[in-house]
Image: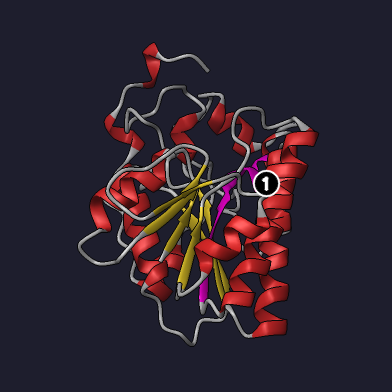
Amino acid sequence: MLITGASGLIGSLVIRDLSDRYEFSGLSRRPVAGIPHTQADISDIDALRRASKGMDMVLHLAAETQDYDDWDRVMEITIGGTLAMYRAAQEAGVKRVVFMSTGSTMCGYEWFEGSPYGALAANEYDRLPAGAKMLDYLDPPRPDSFYGVGKLFGENTGRLFSDKYGMSVLCIRLGAVLASDKPEMVRHFPGYLAQADAVQMVDKCLGAPDSIRFDIFDAISENSRRWRDTSHAKELLGWKPTGSADRYDPKSLAV
C-alpha cells in the first residue's frame, strides 16, 4: 500500500502503529526510513505512476499545509497533486483510495453572525447549545480557506473516479491532530482528534468492505464541544474513538 505524504505527522503515526497490519511504501518530498520510498513531489505524475505500480490501496495524505491561503501552492500541491494521484492510481489498477480531507471543508459555518459553532471555537460555550444542529457529511460544505476548497476538489474528484472507474474512495474529514497529541489553542477543542483515534479511523477505512464505493467520514474525538456528527463512521465502520479534548484545561490556551 502506498502512502503519499508519508513523511508527515499522520503518515508517521500510521507507519508506526499499523505496519504489523499492512505492507507500506511511501512517496514524499522528505525521505522516510524503514519502508520502500520514492522521494518526489506529489505533483510529479511520473513518480506517482512508478510508486503506484503493484499497489492495491493508496492513503493520500500529501497536501499544502504551510499556508492554507496560498492559492498557487494549493493549486499545485493540494489540487494538482491530488489529481495526479487519482490518475496514477486508476492507471495502476488501485482498488481503493483513502483520501485525507479536512474539517476545514465545513469550518466556514463558524463565520455567520450568531453562529453557535463559532461560539464553541471561541470558548463561549461548554457544549453545543440545545436546539443547535450537529452537522454531518450530508450538509452542504462551507470551507474556511483555499485549503478547504482544495480538499473539496479531492472529495469530488474521488466521487468521479469511483463512479467512472469503479474505484473505492473513502474520504476522512480529519479533525485537529497535533504533534503534542493535545489541544494547543482554545479553538482546537471542538475539532480535536487524538492521534490514536486518527490512526484507528485510517485503519477502519483501509479495511472497510469492498462494497463501500464512496463515502465521507467525520473524524473527531469525543469532545463535548464537538459540532460535527461522527455517528456515520461509528455505525458504518465500527470506529470507536476514545480520546477527548475534555481532559485538557482551555483556560491557559490562546483562542
Query: Residue 94 at x, y = what percent?
Result: 53, 76
Task: Write down the region rendered in magenta.
Answer: 96-107
Callout 1: SS: helix
Query: Residue 222 at x, y = what percent?
Result: 35, 47
Determine which quarter of the picture holds residue 184.
Answer: top left
Residue under the image location 57 percent in, 48 percent down: 102
Q: Identify the image quadrant of the N terminus.
A: bottom left
Check the image and name the residue furthest to the left. 20
Is residue 11 one of those drawn in magenta?
no
**Residue 98 in view:** no
Determine which quarter of the picture holds residue 145.
Answer: top right
How many marks can you see?
A: 1
**Residue 2 in view:** yes
Q: Nearer the viewer, residue 118 or 14?
A: 14
Near mark 1 (Cα within 10 A), the count class, few <14, some 14-19 or many ≥20, is many
Query: Residue 254 at x, y = what percent?
Result: 48, 14
Residue under the image location 67 percent in, 46 percent down: 78
Position above or below: 197 against 21: above
Query: Residue 221 at x, y = what percent?
Result: 37, 47
The amino acid marked with disc number 1 is Thr
Determine which quarter of the picture holds residue 244.
Answer: top left
Q: Is residue 187 left or right of residue 105?
A: left
Position above or below: 199 against 233: above
Q: Is residue 173 left or right of residue 203?
A: right
Position above or below: 241 against 239: above
Question: What colour scheme has been applied to the protein in the rendered image?
Answer: secondary structure
Residue under the image location 72 percent in, 65 percent down: 156
Residue indicated by mark 1: 78
Residue under the image location 51 percent in, 62 percent down: 51
